[in-house]
Image (cartoon, rainbow, N blue to C red):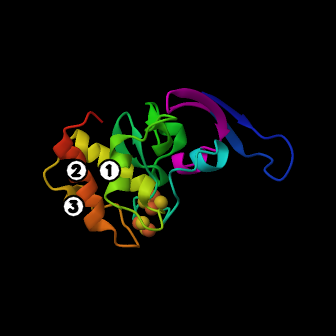
Amino acid sequence: MTIRNSVEGPGEGTQYMEISLEINGTTRRLDVEPGVTLLDALRERLDITGPKKGCDRGQCGACTVHVDGRPVLSCLTLAAAVRRPVTTVEGLSTEDELHPVQQAFVEQDALQCGFCTAGQVMSAVAAVRQDVEDVREFMSGNLCRCSAYPNIVAAVEQVKKADATV
Ligand code: FES
Ligand code: FES
């Protein structure tokens, strides 16, 4: 990791760190200020806009991504502290096929405006992988202003029942 100061312009004197992130299977290098969150690095520096900025303080779950396969709130995670592979909703599907959890969300009509959906899907994938009993409790950190909760839970239960590999 390299740290350097900007030499001219409005941000003169600001410290930047060169970091490397593995995102959806691709290594990306970028310069960030030490306090930049993973969410801002993804959305504003790398144009990966699946994770959404809802509250920006850990209260809505819209920014959920996986780090090393575990769901994390990217608005509360410093980009420079991430050392393990990151997966966003963009990394779940292939060009031709939705991920089974995404497909179940479509089939169960588990979204309305869609703002929360990327975060919901990332938590749902973790719920299926961990075979959690209480889906509602596991996903209680993912808020949905449209109250699509029953359909979201139904989507997760559908994938669990299908015993699909996710
Ligand atoms: S934007 Fe991260 S929890 Fe709301
Ligand atoms: S579908 Fe609108 S916020 Fe969840």
Label 2 lies in ligand 2 vicinity (Cβ under 8 Å): no
- Of helix, strand and loop, which one carries label 2? helix
**Residue 11 screen position, x and y as percent:** 78, 50
The residue that disc 2 covers is 158
The residue that disc 3 covers is 136
- The amino acid pointed to by label 3 is Arg
Magenta-drawn stretch contains 117: no
The numbered disc on residue 104 is 1
Disc 2 or 3, which lies upstream in sequence? 3
- The amino acid pointed to by label 1 is Ala
Residue occupying image coordinates x 48% and y 54%: 75
Residues tagged 1 and 2 counted as in contact (Cβ below 8 A)? yes
Within 10 Å of disc 2 (Cα), the crowding (few <14, some 14-19, many 20+) is some
- Of helix, strand and loop, which one carries label 1? helix
**Residue 50 screen position, x and y as percent:** 52, 50
- The amino acid pointed to by label 2 is Gln
Residue 63 visible to an observer of this rendering: yes
Q: Quadrant of residue 164?
A: top left
